[in-house]
Image (tube, rainbow, N blue to C red):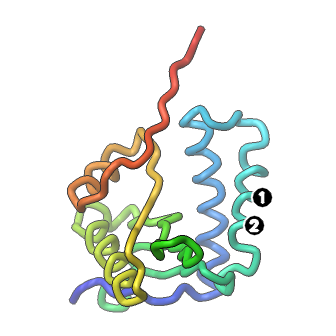
Amino acid sequence: MSLVLVPMSAERFISWNERLVAEYAQEKVDAGNWPAEGALERSITENRTLLPKGVDTPAHHLFIGAVDREEVGVLWLFTDLAVPVPEAFIYDIEIGQARRGQGYGRELLEAAEGWCADHSIAVLRLHVFGSNTTAISLYESSGFEITNLNMSKQIR
C-alpha cells in the first residue's frame, strides 16, 4: 500500500512539537546560526509564533504520513495564498528513524506535491540545512532547484 496523508491529531502534535523544537534548536546551533545558550528557548518562541493554535493554526497543515495505518513520517506545510502565485512551504518533512532508507521520504514528498496540486498550489518550497546531504540529494532528484544559498566562513 502507498503512503497517505492523515491530519495530525492534537495529541500527536504535543510529542511531535516537543521533539521538533529541540531538534531545530540543535540544527541551528550545529549550523552556526545560533549560540547554544538560549537556543531551545529561541526555537520554542519561533515555533509558538508559527503555530499559536497548534494543529488548528490557519494556513498550516500538519500531517502524518502513514502506510497501512502505521505512521512512517510527518509533514508540516504552510500555504501562502497572499502571493501572486499560490505556494506552500515545507516547514518539516521527516521519516521516523526506523523507516529511513525505504523510499518513504520520496513518497512523503510526492504526497506533499499531490496535496499541493489538489489545492491549486503552484509552487512548493523548502529549506534544508547544508549539512543534510541525504535530504539535499532527495530534493534535487525530485526536481527542486536552489533558489537561495547562504554560505559562511569561520574566521579565527
Q: Amino acid at mark 2?
A: Arg
x and y percentages locating residue 67 in the rendered image: 31, 85
Q: Is residue 62 above or below residue 17?
A: below
Gap in angstroms between the C-alphas marked 2 and 1: 5 Å
Outermost residue toward the front in this view: 84
Q: Cβ–Cβ below 8 Å for labels 2 and 1?
A: yes
Outermost residue toward the top in this view: 156
Residues 86 and 59: in front is 86
* Residue drawn 60% across the image and 43% down it: 28
Q: Secondary structure at mark 1?
A: helix
Residues 57 and 26: in front is 57
Q: Amino acid at mark 1?
A: Thr
Which part of the image, by quadrant, shows the C terminus?
Answer: top right
x and y percentages locating residue 150 in the rendered image: 49, 36
| Residue where numbered disc 2 is placed | 48
Residues 19 and 48: in front is 48
| Marker disc for residue 45 | 1
Which part of the image, by quadrant, shows the N terminus?
Answer: bottom left
Name the side, left or right, on which 38 lies relative to 20: right
* Residue drawn 56% across the image and 74% down it: 80
| Marker disc for residue 121 | none
Q: Is residue 95 above or below residue 44?
A: below
x and y percentages locating residue 68 in the rendered image: 30, 90
